[in-house]
Amino acid sequence: MNETLTAIGLCLLGYLSGSLVFALWITRLVKGVDVRDAGSFHATTTNTIRQAGWLPGAAVFILDISKGYLPTLLAVKYAPYSWVIPVTAGLTVVGHCWPLFGQFRGGMGLATAGGSIYAVYPGGFWVGIAIVIALSLSIKHSARAALFTGILLAPTFYMLGERGIVIWLAAACGLVIALRFRDDWHREYRELWLDREKN
């Protein structure tokens, strides 16, 4: 019974941690606006940069990584069953994308997924960044690049020799990212990284 409660608690912690909408709160604090009402209409680092500047954007980026890293690390240390680790990580990304504390209107999940991956496979964090940058440069559409990154994470880690929890965690986080970025598949972009819409 105690093991079951611990498993449920860790998974719930993952979702609640992901639901901390730092982009919304920080942009509102700095500029008095809802970050989701302009730009990409998402609670993301890049949209925070557009509306509040680079320093608030950097704070959001670090906090979004941390909210993925910490619950996943706790799951690694205390999960009574191995499946709890990828489920906790996946739910953290779900929380970021559809946050309880943000009326279920959140971000896109990349930074939070990166934090979760870093907790179990630090090198995978940098591999993920490399994939999304390479795809963004080649197809020149960052939402589609992110979607394909989500799909490619687990197979890439497998080819790099990883097995077990790392693969399942990458698959869980990658699936949520791919599903989330489907919403932006048809968005048009003027600037590669900042994802600004064409006039």
Image (cartoon, grey):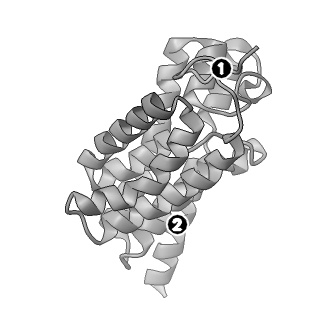
- Mark 2 = which residue? 11
Question: Which residue type carries mark 2?
Answer: Cys
Q: Position of residue 1 (x, y in %)?
A: 49, 88
Q: Position of residue 152 (x, y in %)?
A: 41, 54
Q: Position of residue 174 (x, y in %)?
A: 48, 56
Question: Which residue type carries mark 1?
Answer: Arg
Q: Residue at x 28, y 63 (%)?
A: 158
Task: Answer with mark 1 or mark 2, whichever residue precedes in sequence.
Answer: 2
- Residue 6 drawn above or below residue 196: below
The answer to whether any part of residue 51 appears in the image is yes
Q: Residue 104: which disc?
A: none
Q: Residue at x 52, y 23 (%)?
A: 193
Q: Residue at x 66, y 33 (%)?
A: 43
- Residue 38 drawn above or below residue 71: above
Residue 195, picture quadrant: top right
The answer to whether any part of residue 14 appears in the image is no
Q: Residue at x 55, y 60 (%)?
A: 91
Q: Residue 196: which disc?
A: 1
Query: In the image, is 15 to the left or to the right of 138?
Result: right
